[in-house]
């Protein structure tokens, strides 16, 4: 059974940076497309960025040019480098994935809180 463990969140000032990590247990990680999602209070969870098994990436418009998703198949980890953070980036961030991009077939992890505030 695949388990997802997110980490790296915290409190940061506007304009700052954070790097999130998602450790994925279980086999076949390299076959999965993975995505980072976020959920702000009172809002639906949204897809922020995803990366295909082959490495191609896609981003929601609000984070293009600021966030970078990457993966390390040897470490079975997916990362989200977040730069130029804005208060509207405040949310709980989760990872998930599946055999196709923009799919979420695994049980959700606990997420990691990102708070952007001065």
Image (cartoon, rainbow, N blue to C red):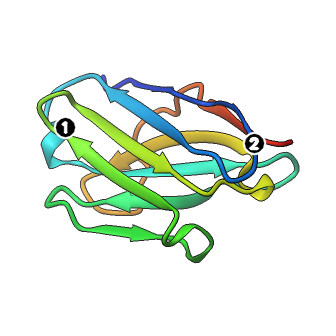
Question: Quick check: 24 above or below 57?
Answer: above
User: Residue 93 is drawn in which quadrant?
Assistant: top right
Left/right of residue 74 with respect to residue 87 in the rendered view: left
Question: Quick check: 101 above or below 18?
Answer: below
Q: Tag on residue 13?
A: 2
Q: Secondary structure at mark 1?
A: helix
Left/right of residue 12 with respect to residue 105 in the rendered view: right
Left/right of residue 3 with respect to residue 42 in the rendered view: left
Q: Position of residue 7 (x, y in %)?
A: 50, 25
User: Residue 22 is drawn in which quadrant?
Assistant: top left
Q: Quadrant of the N terminus?
A: top left
Q: Secondary structure at mark 2?
A: loop
Q: Position of residue 15 (x, y in %)?
A: 68, 53
User: Residue 84 is drawn in which quadrant?
Assistant: bottom right
Q: Tag on residue 60?
A: none
> Which residue carries the number 1 mark?
29
Q: Position of residue 11 (x, y in %)?
A: 73, 31
Which residue is located at x 78 percent, y 49 percent?
A: 40
């Amino acid at each position: 059974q695949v388990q997802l463990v997110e980490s790296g969140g915290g409190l940061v000032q506007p304009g700052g940076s954070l790097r999130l990590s998602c450790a994925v247990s279980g086999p076949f990680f390299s076959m999965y497309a993975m995505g980072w999602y976020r959920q702000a209070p009172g809002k639906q969870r949204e897809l922020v960025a995803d990366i295909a098994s082959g490495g191609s990436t896609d981003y929601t418009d609000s984070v293009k040019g600021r966030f970078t998703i990457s993966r390390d198949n040897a470490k079975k980890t997916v990362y989200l480098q977040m730069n130029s953070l804005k208060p509207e980036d405040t949310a709980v961030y989760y990872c998930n994935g599946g055999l196709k991009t923009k799919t979420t077939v695994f049980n959700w992890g606990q997420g990691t809180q990102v708070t952007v505030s001065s």
